[in-house]
Image (cartoon, rainbow, N blue to C red):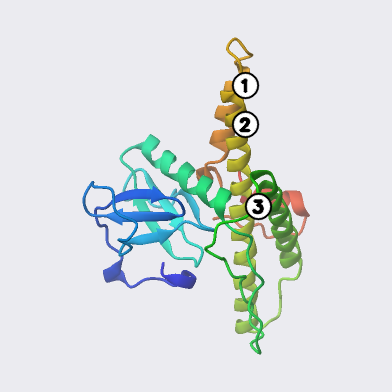
Amino acid sequence: MSSEGKKTSAWKRKWMPFFATLKGMILFLHKSDEVTSPENTRHCLGVHHSLASRATDYIKRPFVFRFVTSDWREFLFQGKNLRDMNDWIEAINLVAATYSSPPLPAPVGSCKRFQRPVMPFSRTQLPLTKQLEHHEKKSKEAEEQLIESLRSKPTSATGRELEEWQEKHEFFEYEYKRYKMYVNVLRASKLESKLRDKPRGADRSVDSIMLQMKRSCSLGDLDLSSRYKGRNGRESYFLAIYKE
């Protein structure tokens, strides 16, 4: 997908071999295995406000994950093996969750069409604890907006009104998914840090907790392909969408 989630022409959608290096909030793609210099930005992608997840719907190649940028461009990457793929997903999401600045209000103009907020590239000034609180707040907001959007779905509307509702609903759904991931990955990172500081001989059952939390951070377990058609409340709606 190109920017704004528009489908890219078929001749541009081809697999190309690249080496990748994640430096700060930039994912550099280079042809050789030499580490690229920061000045070489010909092939690079911003990781701010991005989301990486396993591409469970892509079956032509194994170990493929999807990378969605802040402007909704979409790329598919193939890892060497399952562990390599999961390491990339975890690293990208951890960087995005840790360093992404709070979004800015949507631009104001005469156009009444729904406008997404501005996702700044600058690094956040919030400490990690406040960053986690911010993500939790945004996740809760997106959840409430999703519920309200579902309740206000137009039943007898024109094609344009239905299209605008769908655009807004998909945004709230994606934001909930993204911030839910950010919360999970930061919580897992904090727990892992505590485990490193734990003295030898301590209860090793916490290792299994850490493993379980890491697995819960994988978006391969989240399925957005299904849609709940009824109106039986919050719990039923989210259980129908997210297999947690």
Residue 128, quarter of the rendered image:
top right
> Residue visible at 56% across and 65% down?
120
Instruction: Assess disc 1: are there few (<14), some (14-19) or many (≥20) residues with their C-alpha within 10 Å of its C-alpha.
Output: few
In the displayed structure, 194 sits above or below 52; it is above
Q: Position of residue 196 (x, y in %)?
A: 56, 24
Q: Would you say the residues marked 2 and 1 are in contact, meaning their CB atoms lie under 8 Å apart?
A: yes
Question: What amino acid is at disc 1?
Answer: Val
Front-lying residue, 208 or 70: 70
| Lower position in the chain sequence, tag 1 or tag 3 | 3
* Disc 2 residue crowd, few under 14, some 14–19, many 20+, Cα 10 Å: some
Q: Is residue 29 left or right of residue 229?
A: left
Q: Tell me the quadrant of the picture where the C terminus can be found.
A: top right
> Label 3 is placed on what type of residue?
Leu
Callout 2, which amino acid? Leu
Q: Which residue matches tag 2?
A: 191
Sequence order check, earlier mark of 2 and 1: 2
What residue is shown with label 3?
126
Q: Please say whether residue 161 is visible from this viewpoint.
A: yes
